[in-house]
Amino acid sequence: MIGKSPGTKLILDRIRRFAPLPWPVVLLGETGTGKELAARTVHRKSPRRHHPFIATNVTAIPEALFESELFGHARGAFTGAHNSRTGLLEAAEGGTLFLDEINSLAPHMQEKLLRVLQEKEIRKVGSNLTLPVDVRFITATNQDLGALCKEGKFRQDLYHRLHVLPIHLPPLRDREEDLPLFVAHLPGNIRELENSLRYAVAIAESEDLPEQLFAFLEKGTPRACVPRLMSIEEYSRRALLEWGSELSRKELASRLGISRKTLWEMRKRWGIA
C-alpha cells in the first residue's frame, strides 16, 4: 500500500497497530477503495503471515452453496457429493479468512458464522463430527452494518463479534495527494494508462492537473488544454456512457482496470443499460 495523504497514513497506522492482534478486523469503504489489498497487508504483517490467506466475496457464491463452500461437505452429503470437500474455513487454518461484502451474508449463514466465532469449531455439511479451527477473520463492507442491524438485516450479536477493529478506507477523491504516487506505481500496460489519462484530460472541465500528472503526459500537450483530472467515479461513468455500446463487458472492464462484477455494480448504480 502506498500513499502520503492523511487518510492513507491513518490506514497504514491502523494496519500497523491491528495486524499483530488476534481479533477480527472490519474494512469499511466504497467499492474500489482497496479493501482486499488492505486485508492482505494486515495478514502479511501479522503473526499468521506464514499460513494461508483465503479470500472470497460473499456475493460471488450462490446462497444455496455458501454453507458447503464455507464449511466443506462430507461424501454423500447431497446429490452429486461423490467426495468430501474442504471448506474455506478449514483451508484457512492457522491463517486469515477474508470475507468481502459481509453485509450480503444470508441470515441463516450469519447464525452459523456467529457460532464459528463463538465456538471456534466447524461441522462439515452432512457430517456429525466437529473440527476445531484457528482462523482470524477479516471482513469488508461498503454499507453501514450498524444501520443494517437497526433494520433487522444483520445480526446485532454477529456485528459486535466482527466489528472489533474497524479500518475506514476513504475513496480516492478524498486522497488526491496519493494520485500521482498511484500513477507512478501502476504496473502493467503503461500505454493504456497514458491513453486513459489523455482521455480524462480531454473531457475534464475545470482547474489544473497536479504538476506530477502533467509531467507524465508528453511535453507537447498545450497547457491550456489540461484541466483537472476528474474523479475515478466520474471518469468511469462517462466511459460507460461513451464506450458501453462499442466494447464488450470484458474489454470495457479491462480498459477501466476493474472487474466485470464491479462494472455490473456501476451500471446498476447509475442506471446504465
Image: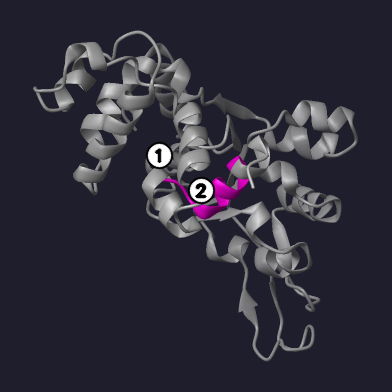
Is the N terminus in the top left, top right, bottom left or bottom right quadrant?
A: top left
Tell me where residue 129 appears, x and y as whole percent: 76, 74
Q: Position of residue 72 (x, y in %)?
A: 67, 72
Q: Relative to residue 18, is residue 139 depicted above or below? A: below
Mark 1 nearby-residue class (10 Å; few <14, some 14–19, many ≥20): some
Answer whether residue 254 is magenta in the image.
Answer: no
Between the C-alphas of marks 2 and 1, the distance is: 34 Å
Q: Residue at x 55, y 26 (%)?
A: 167
Left-right relation of 227 to 125 = left
Q: Does the magenta portion include 258?
A: yes
Q: In this orientation, does residue 31 appear?
A: yes
Q: Is residue 128 above or below residue 92?
A: below
Residue that appears at 40% across and 15% down: 205
Tag 2's secondary structure?
A: loop
Residue at the right extreme of this rendering: 152
Q: Which mark is residue 244?
A: 2
In the picture, measured across the screen, residue 248 lies left or right of residue 159, that is left
> What scheme was used to colour the molecule?
one colour
Main SS class of the magenta portion in the image: helix
Q: Amino acid under label 1?
A: Thr
Q: What span is colored magenta in the figure?
A: 257-266
In the picture, the disc for residue 41 is: 1
| Residue 91 coordinates in the image, percent (x, y) | 54, 65
Nearest to the eye among marks 2 and 1: give it.
Answer: 2
From the viewer's perspective, is residue 99 above or below residue 27?
A: below
Is residue 52 shown to the viewer in this render?
A: no
Give whichever of discs 2 and 1 has the lower sequence position: 1
